[in-house]
Image: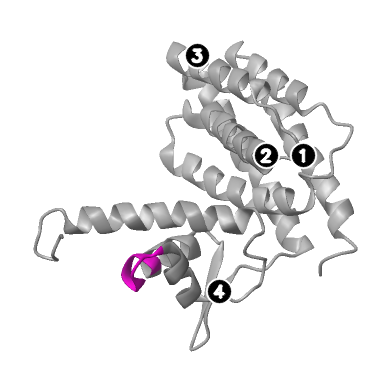
Amino acid sequence: MLSPLDDGFDDAKNTLASHLVDRLREEILSGNLAPGSKINVENIRRNFGVSLSPLREAFARLIAVGLVELHDNKGYSVAPISLSNLIEITQLRVDFESLALSNAVARGDINWESDVMRALYKLNRTVRDQSDVKSLDAWERAHRQFHLTLIAGSNMPMLVNFCDILHNLNDRYRRIFLVKRGGDRNVANEHSEIAQAAVARDSVVACEKLREHIQRTGINLKQILSSQIPA
């Protein structure tokens, strides 16, 4: 067993905290931990089989990215949702991701082009069965990877990190309220148009298609949420 004096103790603690962040993030994004709900830390500690120290570290990281809130003397809760929050997240995604994609188109090398097309192929080949949780989870992972790969060629790590945070915040709304409702959109075609314009180095078209893609989801979500959550 590692002790606090061992060189690997902090690394092991950070690795465990990172694993907990991933698990808790998925619980929040999927809605299993409902927006605005109080988090029972002891229940999570027991269910995950961990001590409080790495769990608190995981919560601190989730607070930093807007998914968890800490209330004085009241503990932790899942960040609430609202129409105004959704509208702001959508606008920030439009602005930041189009900026990142523009830079990726200008700076990305041939490896970035290959990565984008591989991510697109994997996403479009991943079946999304609305009745199959595992299928939905696999599609979500491929979808997230596609969007992050698109902007990775920007060589702007701070901007990419902001986009990653916004993508998670937006995905929570989409996965809770929209993902199982289907619709008449050809999302695979939308992704293909963005990727093909990007690797063709057509920044204007690529960014326009990306903005339309994000805004279309935002509009659909606002229509659904307007009668369900506060402004």
Q: Earlier in the sequence, mark 1 or mark 2?
A: 1
Amino acid type of the residue tagged 1 in the rendering? Gln
Quadrant assignment for the C terminus: bottom right
- Find out whether residue 54 is within the magenta segment: yes
Amino acid type of the residue tagged 2 in the rendering? Leu
Per the image, the residue denoted by label 4 is: 39
**On screen, 139 above or below 89?**
above
The secondary structure type at the circle numbered 2 is helix
- Find out whether residue 9 is within the magenta segment: no
The secondary structure type at the circle numbered 4 is loop
Residue at image x 71%, y 61%?
85
Q: Which mark lies nearer to you, 2 or 3?
A: 2
Q: Nearer the viewer, residue 36 or 166?
A: 36
Per the image, the residue denoted by label 1 is: 130
Question: Residue 181's image quarter?
Answer: top right
Mark 1 vs mark 4, CA separation in Å = 28 Å
- Chain part drawn in magenta: 49-55
Q: Position of residue 90 (x, y in %)?
A: 71, 48
